[in-house]
Amino acid sequence: MNLTKQHILNLLEELSHLEIDLSDKYQIDGKRVPRVTEILSAMIHQESLMTWSNSLGWKRISYKAFLQEAADKGTYSHLAIEKYLKDGFVDLDTLPLNDRIKSSVVSCMDGFMLWWNQLKTNHDVSVVSTEETIVHKYFGGTCDCLLKIDGKYKLVDFKTSNNMNYKYGLQLAAYRYLFREVKNINLDQCMILMLSKTNHSYLTYELDLSNKTHLSYIDNCEYTFLTLLAGYMMRLFTNNEYQSIFDVKQ
């Protein structure tokens, strides 16, 4: 039997009524739902991460400390961009940044400003929302930026990682689903804006949903994400059953 999108949605509808303990902050009608990034992180295992974490150990670099510093660089870069888009300026000296983090944030902001100024020079651009949290009964997420460019809706997701990752397409598809199903906004374009933490530059990975190939890809990403979400929820549900039947606390 082919597992159609409707089959997956039917399963998610059944699971949406279950009281499953989640640590995520996203709530709808008093019930917590998982966030997009947690679903992808939990359901897609990357063997390369194990090799990378082991290499840090050989260099006597704390895995947790390294991840925290990378997270801080990303968080403050996002915050700086958000402040700029809302206020038209940002003073990085007002942010609690140590020298290593600040140099990365400056590089990311420089790359962002290069992209932003080129965009504004060549197009009619307005900011619809920044860091907007959208919650559906199945899942929630916080979307970096929604722009209207020459009358078309464009979702932009900022990344400060070193490499493009196929999970980013799944993330874009999940946010597209949220905008469509919750906000009644149909996106025309999606983009990953990769901001370098070292060389003050940027790269773009764009999807034009008027292009049949791009549209097919994002539709397939949405199907994949919803399948992963169903698996994620079933895993939580069966884990709760396991704890109840065997009286095990985790």
Image (cartoon, rainbow, N blue to C red):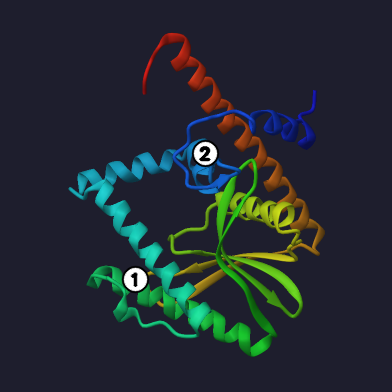
**Viewer-nearest residue: 113 or 132:** 132
Taking the view exactly as shown, the residue that stands out farthest to the front is: 30
Determine which quarter of the picture holds residue 186: bottom right
- Horizontal arrangement in the rendering, residue 17 relative to residue 22 (left or right): right
For the N terminus, the quadrant is top right
* Amino acid type indicated by mark 1: Ser
For label 1, the crowd category at 10 Å Cα-Cα, with few meaning under 14, some 14 to 19 and many 20 or more, is: many
From the image, tell me which residue sits under label 1.
104
Determine which quarter of the picture holds residue 27: top right
Taking the view exactly as shown, the residue that stands out farthest to the top is: 246
Q: Disc 2 on helix, strand or loop?
A: loop
From the image, tell me which residue sits under label 2.
44
Q: Disc 1 on helix, strand or loop?
A: helix
* Amino acid type indicated by mark 2: Ile
Residue 9 in view of the camera: yes
- Residue 133 is situated, as x and y percent measured from the top left of the image, at 56, 58
- Cα distance in 3D space between marks 2 and 1: 28 Å
Residue 166 in view of the camera: no
- Horizontal arrangement in the rendering, residue 219 relative to residue 128 (left or right): right
- Residue 15 is situated, as x and y percent measured from the top left of the image, at 64, 29
Q: Total marks drawn?
A: 2
Q: Earlier in the sequence, mark 2 or mark 1?
A: 2
* Residue found 38% across the figure and 67% down from its top: 76
